[in-house]
Amino acid sequence: MENTVETKYGKIEGIDHGWYSEYRGVPYAKPPVEDLRWRAPQPPEPFQGTFQAKEFPAKSCQREGSAPPWDKDFYDDPNYERKTSEDCLYLNIWAPKDAEGCPVAFWIHGGAFMGGSASEKEFDGVEYCRRGVIFVSVQYRLGIFGFFAHPWLTEEAGTSGNYGALDQIAALKWVYENISAFGGDPENITVFGQSAGAMSTQTLISSPLTGNMIKRAILQSGGSYGVGLHRDLTLKEQESFGMALPEILGAKSLEELRAKSTEEVFAATDKFMGANMPVAKGLFLVPTIDGKLLTDGYYPTIDKGEIKDLPYMIGSTKEDIMVEPGKNSPEERPLYRGSVAFSQKLEELGRKPAYVYDFLRDLPGDEQGAWHSAELWYMMGTLGRCWRPWTAGDYALSARMLDYWCNFMRTGDPNGEGLPKWEPCGKEKPFVMELDIPSG
């Protein structure tokens, strides 16, 4: 049996799993192809008939595969792999049956703004549905298609770049306007993500373009204050990086640039990155300060009290990104320090400090430890999809984390019956919840 819902754009038929329904590959914007390449996302066309939301969509253009340890954990099963395409602006929804007024979890995947998708092996919304939360995972343009800026584009639209971030906002608006049809509460949306997804979440809470659509936010291994992964790149800097692309592709105008095939543009990525990395000194195809999406740098925006006044959860893992081998004490870990500083800065602004966590569980099966992304299996409740020799303690930790995450989404407070007490992280009492299994 299938479920059918009526949205602003027409009827959508999903997959009926009995006690919950799943809607795969729902378009939230027009395909950003041909003349819509490197433009802000446009609202989708109304459906002709009933849209069949039963297959995960193509993922945004990116390289195939990944490096260790992600390759063996997340990319080892071809059943979860999808082709790549510029036509990638889709979202997936998991909703409990007979839902009404449910909190909504809006998930933004990671991947350094260069890779990833909304239907990776480790992602699933079933355990959120089990706890009365609607789960939404979204895709957005990546890399050269998502964050390329150039004076030609700026002249055309008044700004350029940031297409991937604007996609996320378009998806958020779609959810805000349509999720009630699935039983969700549009006034109770938690935006959350990991790595580039957390950086994206910090972008959305820093942007005037998201208005009041966000109720709460969770930043996993990417949110920070003072020290972290964020780069404050200006539109002028991004435009200067973009100057290399027409030269590489032999394009003399924006029209010629848009006329290039997907394959031609993507094939230019390596040369484009190589031409700019010596100057950019790191990833640069990222959200940009353009006066519209972002009006200032990430930390100055916090200093001015211009990030949204919301309940927050934020944290990192023991062997997270930027952690040097063997130097994983809290004071040696940049994202740990940046998470605590984020919370305490909120308190300094006169707001409630955040709930800060530290994921410490060394994943069983190898010597990688609690690596960047290791917590995803647990807070998604998908341990059973992984090759690792999980213990009863791992499953208990996963259930505990899911309870914390869903309680927070419901009320802004992760605490609940039977859970260890989680205090906010203030200056007087800098509490950090340690997420681990009992030793011994």
Image (cartoon, helix red, strand yellow):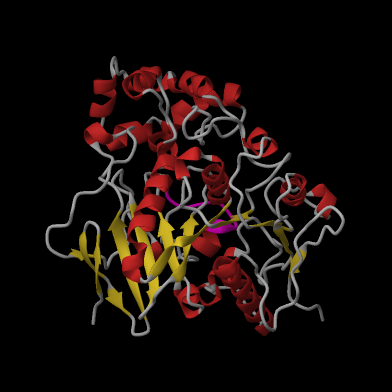
User: Measuring 54% from the left and 64% from the top, which residue is drawn there?
Assistant: 73
Q: Say above or below: 400 vs 120.
A: below
Query: Quick check: 387 left or right of 120?
Result: right
Query: Magenta part mainly helix, strand or loop?
Result: loop
Residue 311 in picture, x, y percent from top left:
63, 57
Residue 170 in picture, x, y percent from top left:
37, 47
Q: Say above or below: 97 vs 343.
A: below
Q: Say above or below: 54 vs 270.
A: below
**Which corner quadrant holds the C terminus?**
bottom right
Residue 26 in picture, x, y percent from top left:
29, 59
Query: Quick check: 36 left or right of 389?
Result: left
Outermost left residue: 49
User: Measuring 66% from the left and 33% from the top, which residue is drawn there?
Assistant: 300
Outermost front residue: 350
Q: Report whether residue 240 is seen.
A: yes
Q: Say above or below: 114 vs 406.
A: above
- Image quarter for residue 159? top left
Query: Quick check: 168 left or right of 34?
Result: right
Of 155 and 64, nearer the camera is 155
Q: Report whether residue 124 is seen.
A: no
**Which corner quadrant holds the N terminus?**
bottom left
Of 65 and 397, nearer the camera is 397
Residue 225 in picture, x, y percent from top left:
70, 42
Outermost top residue: 252
* Magenta region, residue range: 63-70
Q: How many marks?
A: 0
User: Measuring 75% from the left and 50% from the top, which residue is drawn there?
Assistant: 347
